[in-house]
Every structure is written in C-alpha cells, then in structure tokens.
C-alpha cells in the first residue's frame, strides 16, 4: 500500500520501509494511550458496551482505510479508531471474571487465536483481494477507467473486513453476556436468592414477587398485586420451613464452628430477628448472609484482594499450604481448590495494615505487565519485518516474492495456529504452568526468526524457498501462541479481582505501545539492514533471537509461589 502511495515520488527503499512502519504503528499507538482509561471505564459501566463501541469504530475505520488514496488519509483512518478501541481490554477482563485455572488456558488460547488469526488472515485477505483490477483484469466489476476499484485498489479487502466487523457488532449486542460482577444479574431475584445462600426459610421469592416481613404460610394460594408488598411495619407472618438446597446443607456442615456460640456451648444459635426480604435483596451479597444470621463463606464477590487472587493464592488441586501460614480450602466449580493464605505475613497483595494494595504496588503484577509488553513487541516486530524482507528485491538481500506468493505460507501458519490453540496448548499449559510455557515460547522464537532469512540460501529455487517459509510460519504460529497466551494468563492470575479492568487496561496499553513500536522498529531495522552487504540481511532477524533469549531470562524474576 505504501509503495502504491509513493509511486512516482521517487522514494527509496529505506523511506518506504520507514513509512510502512509508521503506518502500521498508527493504530496501536493511540490504543497505548486510551487502553488504560477504557479499562477503568469498563470497571464502571461494564465490559459489553466497551466491546460494542470498539467494534463499531474498528469496522468503520477499516473501510475508510481502504478508501484512502494518500498516506495521510490512511494514517488518520487507523489513528482515530485506535483511540476508541477498548475491545481487547474488556475481553481479557471478561475471561478473568468468567474462568478459573481449569479452563482459563483454553479460553485465553481462543482469544489469542482470534487476535493472531487476524494478523494471519488479514494479510492473506489483503493479498488475495487487493488491486483486483490488476489481478483479475478490467472485466472485474467496477474496474473500468475511473471506476471505484480502479481508483481505490485497496478498498475491496477492507470492505469485506468492514462487513465482518458489522456482524461482530450484532453478535456482541445480542449474544454477549455482561460479566462485570456488580452488573452481572443484578436485577435477577433468582440470582440474589442464590447469593443469599438458598435459605428459603428466611427469604422466599415466588414467581418474581417479594413479600416484606416474612412469608405467609398461605402465600402460594394468594395473589400479590403487581409491584405491591405487605407493609414492613406489620409483624411477620408464620414461616413455612422449606428444605435448604444440598449445597447449603454442606456449607452449614463445613462451617458449623463459625456458627457456634462464642462460649463454645454446643447449643443452637438464637434465632435471628426476621429481616424484611426486600431490604435483604437490596444489600450486597456478602451483607445478605450476615443479615439472615449466616456466616459468609468468603469475601464479597468482586472484592477479592490480590492476596486472594494473586500469585500468593491460586486455584489448584491437592496442594498443601505453604509453611508458616494457614490456608483455608474452598471448592470451586472449576474442579480445583482455592488455597487462601491468611492476611498478614508473606502476603504480597496486602499492606502491613491489612488493607488491599493497588495493582501497581504488587511486584509480580508490575513484572507480568512488563514481560507481556516485551513479548508483544517482539512478535509484532517480526510480523512487520517478515513481509518487507520477503517482498524486497533480491539485489537488496530480500527474496523478491510478491505478497500473493507469500499468502500460501501465511494461510498454513493460520491453520497450524488454530489446531494448536484449540487442541494442544491448553493441555500443555496445564502440564507445565503458564510461566514455563511462556519461557518455552520465547526460546522457540529464536529458530523461528532465523528460519525466515535462511530461505535466501535457496534463491531462485522457489519450491525450496516456499518449503522453508512454510516451516517458519508453522513454527512461528506455535511459539507465538504459547508465549503471548501464557503471558496474558500470568497477568490475569496476578490481577486483584476488583481491579481487573484497570490491570488489563494497562496490559493492553503496553501491548498497544509494543504493537506501535514493533512495526516502527521493524521498518527502521530494515532501513538499516538494507544498507549492509547483501548477505547480512539476516541481522534484523538475529536481533529478534537475541531479544527472545533476554526476555526469557527476565521472566525468571516472576514467581508463581
């Protein structure tokens, strides 16, 4: 696209590489500024609306991008939608709120697959549909002199992408569910009844109607006016006991010591005073338990400190607590057990006074964020450098291939990425853990980077060139998924639950900054490399390998204990 803009302007290969990097950075750079604010906004208004807004701007921006006929117009078409795109921030927070260790690896792999498939199918779609008049001839619709696709040769693939974006908006509106704890099911009385603990003897919800002051024994035979309720000032009517659900009975058995009188007597607790049910339903879930005389199982939903949800407390099966601390086990629907360390000694998520720390005060959160940003930078650097190198003239040290010749290996990499993400990665990550998986992905980035320029050895034997590129794209897909997905899981494990949006906002800001710097640095690296002797074109890829090794060493500072 940049070569087309520069046609007739006499720009050098170095200038084209620099402009290509600048254009690629035009979208991620504004996201690096806006992602953190969008994360904070999603903590207040919900995740779903942020996803819808971002999808709308992305769909419109991509169409305007393809319609651009100048470099400035294309730059603005990428820059402005980037400001309003908080989609990735909200989606990563939704996964953190919806999943535990038993299924987070698979969910995060699917999310990373979606982003990565975009980087694969986007260039493939562009290579197949760009400049249709040149590829398919003047007989293609709207390819006559002065017609739409003749004047705007890059519009067709972006129109297709825009239609896909509109479909995504419709899907978000009608199929996506809100996961922000304070908004999720807030108006559903059945959800409120469940959070109370299932004590139907104290709070009865019948056909969506509520009765203050207790439940009448004949409530099933009487109609309650819509929107009406008994007067809260009246004495409570007789209750008809209803058997509590099995889960509530098990909870009462497990936490019987918490319900015992302070003096240690085995006698029953005195019956609590009746509480108007409408008042209970308006209270936070944690307070409702106390209102009906029950002992809460744990802290309020959405108010976990980083000690509950950080590296010092995590979901696992059958692991004992660390020496020197007491741990309580609570079962979790995901199948594992949650080990909660006492607040106080050794808890990196709590201050000395016991108050929760802000996310930026937790060392592992800071390290996880920095590591994830570097990982994103490295893979975006390689994504930018690869097509520039492949399409560069052989005399300049490139392979001299057209983008359409490069498309088959890109598609192959996408297939490998999809299969690996959905079948092998979740099991691999559960076996070795996210930290070791991330390190392995970084080690694998070294041979990936060096295989791409190795294809130059086989010029002009196109079959051997393609074989090397197919192998390189397949390995790149595997190790990119491993390192990117694992680094994101590490962040979600580190983030305090009540600050999930802010942490993922900062993570996305760093990732967007990396996506801006990666292509820009990749373009500048080629501008430097192209001035070297022809056999040294691999130097830009060698720099990627060295950086992967150094980043792997950095991750050794992150602790999962």
Image: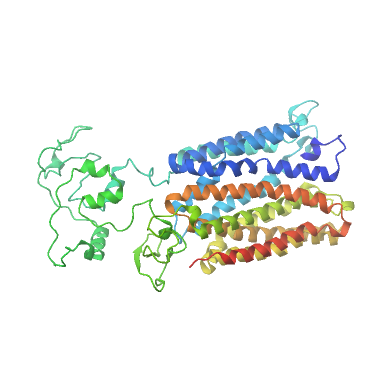
Nearer to me, 68 or 255: 255
Q: Residue at x 40, y 74 (%)?
A: 323
Q: Quadrant of the N terminus?
A: top right
Q: Residue furthest top?
A: 146
For residue 561, side relative to residue 80 (left or right): left
Whether residue 448 is visible to the viewer of this picture, yes or no, is: no
Q: Residue 47: where, in percent of width, then height?
A: 47, 43
Relative to 344, is 237 above or below? above
Q: Residue furthest bottom?
A: 323
Quarter of the rendering containing residue 338: bottom left
Q: Residue 471: where, in percent of width, then height?
A: 72, 61
Count the numbered circles shown. Answer: 0
Q: Residue 182: where, in percent of width, then height?
A: 38, 44
Nearer to me, 502 or 126: 502
Q: Residue at x 32, y 40 (%)?
A: 187
Q: Residue at x 13, y 62 (%)?
A: 268
Q: Residue furthest front?
A: 353
For residue 505, side relative to residue 389 (left or right): left
Q: Residue 179: where, in percent of width, then height?
A: 42, 46
Quarter of the rendering containing residue 280: top left
Nearer to me, 226 or 324: 324
For residue 429, side relative to residue 24 (left or right): left
Whether residue 528 is visible to the viewer of this picture, yes or no, is: yes
Nearer to me, 334 or 554: 554
Relative to 276, is 96 above or below? below
């Amino acid at each position: 696209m940049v070569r087309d803009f520069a046609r007739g302007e006499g720009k050098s290969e170095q200038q084209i590489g620099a402009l290509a990097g600048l254009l690629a950075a035009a979208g991620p750079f504004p996201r690096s500024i806006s992602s953190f604010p969008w994360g904070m906004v999603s903590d207040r208004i919900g995740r779903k609306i942020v996803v819808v807004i971002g999808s709308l701007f992305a769909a419109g921006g991509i169409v305007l991008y393809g319609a651009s006929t100048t470099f400035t117009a294309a730059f603005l078409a990428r820059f402005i939608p980037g400001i309003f795109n908080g989609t990735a921030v909200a989606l990563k927070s939704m996964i953190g709120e919806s999943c535990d260790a038993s299924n987070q690896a698979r969910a995060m792999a699917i999310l990373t697959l979606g982003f990565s498939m975009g980087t694969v199918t986007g260039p493939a779609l562009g290579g197949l549909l760009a400049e249709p008049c040149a590829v398919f001839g003047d007989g293609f619709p709207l390819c006559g002199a002065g017609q739409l696709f003749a004047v705007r040769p890059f519009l067709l693939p972006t129109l297709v992408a825009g239609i896909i974006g509109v479909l995504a908006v419709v899907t978000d509106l009608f199929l996506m569910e809100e996961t922000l704890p304070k908004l999720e099911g807030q108006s559903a009385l059945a959800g409120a009844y469940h959070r109370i603990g299932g004590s139907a003897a104290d709070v009865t919800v019948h056909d969506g109607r509520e009765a203050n002051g207790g439940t009448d024994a004949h409530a099933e035979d009487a109609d309650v006016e819509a929107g009406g309720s008994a007067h809260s000032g009246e004495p409570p009517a007789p209750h008809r006991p209803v058997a509590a659900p099995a889960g509530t009975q098990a909870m009462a058995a497990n936490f019987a010591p918490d319900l015992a009188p302070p003096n240690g007597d085995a006698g029953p607790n005195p019956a609590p005073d009746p509480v108007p049910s409408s008042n209970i339903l308006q209270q936070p879930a944690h307070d409702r338990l106390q209102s009906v005389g029950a002992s809460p199982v744990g802290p309020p939903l959405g108010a976990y400190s980083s000690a509950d949800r950080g590296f010092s407390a995590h979901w696992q099966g059958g692991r004992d607590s660390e020496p020197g601390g007491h741990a309580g086990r609570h079962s979790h629907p995901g199948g594992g057990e949650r080990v909660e360390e006492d607040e106080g000694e050794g808890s990196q998520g709590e201050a000395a006074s016991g108050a929760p720390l802000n996310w930026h005060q937790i060392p592992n959160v800071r390290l996880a964020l920095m590591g994830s940003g570097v990982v994103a930078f490295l893979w975006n650097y390689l994504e930018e450098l690869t097509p520039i190198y492949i399409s560069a003239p052989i005399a300049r040290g490139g392979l001299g291939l057209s983008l359409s010749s490069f498309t088959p290996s890109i598609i192959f990499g996408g297939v490998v990425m999809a299969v690996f993400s959905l079948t092998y990665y979740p099991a691999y990550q559960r076996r070795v853990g996210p930290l070791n998986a991330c390190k392995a992905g970084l080690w694998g980035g070294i041979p990936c980077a060096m295989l791409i320029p190795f294809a130059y050895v086989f010029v002009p034997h196109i079959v051997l060139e393609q074989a090397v590129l197919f192998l390189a794209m397949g390995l790149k897909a595997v190790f990119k998924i491993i390192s990117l997905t694992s680094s994101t899981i590490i962040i979600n494990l580190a983030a305090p639950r009540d600050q999930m949006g802010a942490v993922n906002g900062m993570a996305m800001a760093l990732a967007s900054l990396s996506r801006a710097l990666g292509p820009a640095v990749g373009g500048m690296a080629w501008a430097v490399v192209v001035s070297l002797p022809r056999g040294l074109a691999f130097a830009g890829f060698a720099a990627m390998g060295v950086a992967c090794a150094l980043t792997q060493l950095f991750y050794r500072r992150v602790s999962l204990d």
